[in-house]
């Protein structure tokens, strides 16, 4: 088209000159391999690209924008990874591709976690406590679920003998794969925040940062012109579970009621399900947040559906059977998920994560020193209380954090225990989880950074600092609406009571709402009173067990009942 436009503007040039120029453009612009393809090859043409090779190359360049782990994104400069096989370019902290060997290794590791016998021992899918469905003879191809299973025999009048493999229907002109069993998968919608943007943005349109969109698409396999070799791919006996969950990029939501809590409890009762690897469906094939990989602590394979569906010129992953599950958070509310096993399932998950991610702790456990959670912190036994103050990088800041740290350090002793006061900052939970085990108390404002408290060792505490318009109390100062959105982090901790939740309520004069936010109460900076925090830490020290915590009204009470005459 460009050449035609150029020739149109050259009407004044003589025909001979135009012909010479045209030949020159063709020789320069068209690659030799394409020129060779224009003529029949009768031996001596050299190696030829496979059918669809040029298209597959283009697909690879587009699909290579999907990476499998955000934890590797550390570069702040534009760079290109070393090695000729790399397609990875990094701009700022965003990876725009993954290498072919990374995709291959991710698939290999994920498949190795599967157990072909797992589903034979598991409860029937209709009995699972989530909204689940299943389908047979399906391939993962470039973020699509592709049906191979033909419709019921005889519908088309086909008299061909029975086939050993359903996907051989691709050789038959009359056996159209049945896509109807996949309709449920395409109907699933996920609510999510577009990653990398503040969810308090005042949007100019109705959608803004929060969207509700499908995460996977479905179709029947084509008999020809497929970009991947579907019809010759092996049908695997491993059964993947495709996960559809709301807020899949939100650490606190996913680690709590949206997925981890209900699924960990389900696995505790049905350990055989660990042999069914998870394929997390994400809108538009976006990257899998690294916190999903914490499930490896249970020996559970997990990968994004987008990475698993990339072919990169190889045969796609095809399965005899797949399962899809959604709506892990029960409609009746978070209270229906409260553990009935005194948090045993979550403790086992926590121990598995610590052992997997923290080599030093794992070595200590292997040597018989103690349990991983006990090795990480000897605070109580050594008369030391480790208090971590965490600060968000943007918004919801504790404005006097430095002063709090100084006052904490100056206090030295509290109820006979030495205070070890630290400023902590979290970046990637896969790395941070080891340091988290050293903390007795974590203090911070609402957000993902204090959601790390879900992975603190049993018996530790979180003090969530709430701005004036981010809580409601009754006349006794007790939290009035524990079911509200503002208490989502508290709800996640109450599900197991392995980490104790406390809350500090800032007064109006020490709360500074963000006028740009659609949720100014949540998105407020605060000034915190040290005397009240010190009193709350004493109440924390006085709590010796989950029983004493559950029987006390102090954790639900503003500032644990502590007061300062200077506070409003």
Image (cartoon, grey):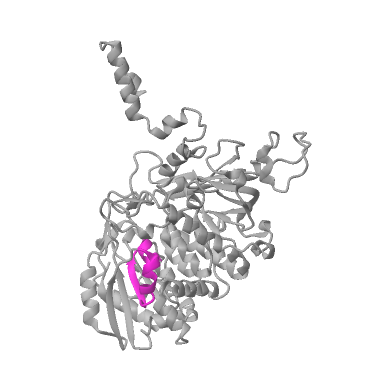
| Quadrant housing the N terminus | top left
Instruction: Give the total number of marks visible in the rendering.
Output: 0
> What residue do we see at 51% from left, 46% from top?
143
> What residue do we see at 47% from left, 35% from top?
45
Whole-percent x and y of residue 19?
A: 32, 16
Magenta stretch contains residue 193:
no
Q: Which one is in front, 45 or 297?
A: 45
Whole-percent x and y of residue 264?
A: 54, 66
Magenta stretch contains residue 446:
yes
Whole-percent x and y of residue 239?
A: 62, 57
Magenta-tinted stretch: 428-451
In the picture, measured across the screen, residue 522 lies left or right of residue 234, that is: left
Decide: is 138 above or below 41. below
In the picture, measured across the screen, residue 169 lies left or right of residue 413, that is: right
Residue that lies at the very extreme toward the front in this rendered image: 44
Q: Is residue 288 visible?
A: no
């Amino acid at each position: 088209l460009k050449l035609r436009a150029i020739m149109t503007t050259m009407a004044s040039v003589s025909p001979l000159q135009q012909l010479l120029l045209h030949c020159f453009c063709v020789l320069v612009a068209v690659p030799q391999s394409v020129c060779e393809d224009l003529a029949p090859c009768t031996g001596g043409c050299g190696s030829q690209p496979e059918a669809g090779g040029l298209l597959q190359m283009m697909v690879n360049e587009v699909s290579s924008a999907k990476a499998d782990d955000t934890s590797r994104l550390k570069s702040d400069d534009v760079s290109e990874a070393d090695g000729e096989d790399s397609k990875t370019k990094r701009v700022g902290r965003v990876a725009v591709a993954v290498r072919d060997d990374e995709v291959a290794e991710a698939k290999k590791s994920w498949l190795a976690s599967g157990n072909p016998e797992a589903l034979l021992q598991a409860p029937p899918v209709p009995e699972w406590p989530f909204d689940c469905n299943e389908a047979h003879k399906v391939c993962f191809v470039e973020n699509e679920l592709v049906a191979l299973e033909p419709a019921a025999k005889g519908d088309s009048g086909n008299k061909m003998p029975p086939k050993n493999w359903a996907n051989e229907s691709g050789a038959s002109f009359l056996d159209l794969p049945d896509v109807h069993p996949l309709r449920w998968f395409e109907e699933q919608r996920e609510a999510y925040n577009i990653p990398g943007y503040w969810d308090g943005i005042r949007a100019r349109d109705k959608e803004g940062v929060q969207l509700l969109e499908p995460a996977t698409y479905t179709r029947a396999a084509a008999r020809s012109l497929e970009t991947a070799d579907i019809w010759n791919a092996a049908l695997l006996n491993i059964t993947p579970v495709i996960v559809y969950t709301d807020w899949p990029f939100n650490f606190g939501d996913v680690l709590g009621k949206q997925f981890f809590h209900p699924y960990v409890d389900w696995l505790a009762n049905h350990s055989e399900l660990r042999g069914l690897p998870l394929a997390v469906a994400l809108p538009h094939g976006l990257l899998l947040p690294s916190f999903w990989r914490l499930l490896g602590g249970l020996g559970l394979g997990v990968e994004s559906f987008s990475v698993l569906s990339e072919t990169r010129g190889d045969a796609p992953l095809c399965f005899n059977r797949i399962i899809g599950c959604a709506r892990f958070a029960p409609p009746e509310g978070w209270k229906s998920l409260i553990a009935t096993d005194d948090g045993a399932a979550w403790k086992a998950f926590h121990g598995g994560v610590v052992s997997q991610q923290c080599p030093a702790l794992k070595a200590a456990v292997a040597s018989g020193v103690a349990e991983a959670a006990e090795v990480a912190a000897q605070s109580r036994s050594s008369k030391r209380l480790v208090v971590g103050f965490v600060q968000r990088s943007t918004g919801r800041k504790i404005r006097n954090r430095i002063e709090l740290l100084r006052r904490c350090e100056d206090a030295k002793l509290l109820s006979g225990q030495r205070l070890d006061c630290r400023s902590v900052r979290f970046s990637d939970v896969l790395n941070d989880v080891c340091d988290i085990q050293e903390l007795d108390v974590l203090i911070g404002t609402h957000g993902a950074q204090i959601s790390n408290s879900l992975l603190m060792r049993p018996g530790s505490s979180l003090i969530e600092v709430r701005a004036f318009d981010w809580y409601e109390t009754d006349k006794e100062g007790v939290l009035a609406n524990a079911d509200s959105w503002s208490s989502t982090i508290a709800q996640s901790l109450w599900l197991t009571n392995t980490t104790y939740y406390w809350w500090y309520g800032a007064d109006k004069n020490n709360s500074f709402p963000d006028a740009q936010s659609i949720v100014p109460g949540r998105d407020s900076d605060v000034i915190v009173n040290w005397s009240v925090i010190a009193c709350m830490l004493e109440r924390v020290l006085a709590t010796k067990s989950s029983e004493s915590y559950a029987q006390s009204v102090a954790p639900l009470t503003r500032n644990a009942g502590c007061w300062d005459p200077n506070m409003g």
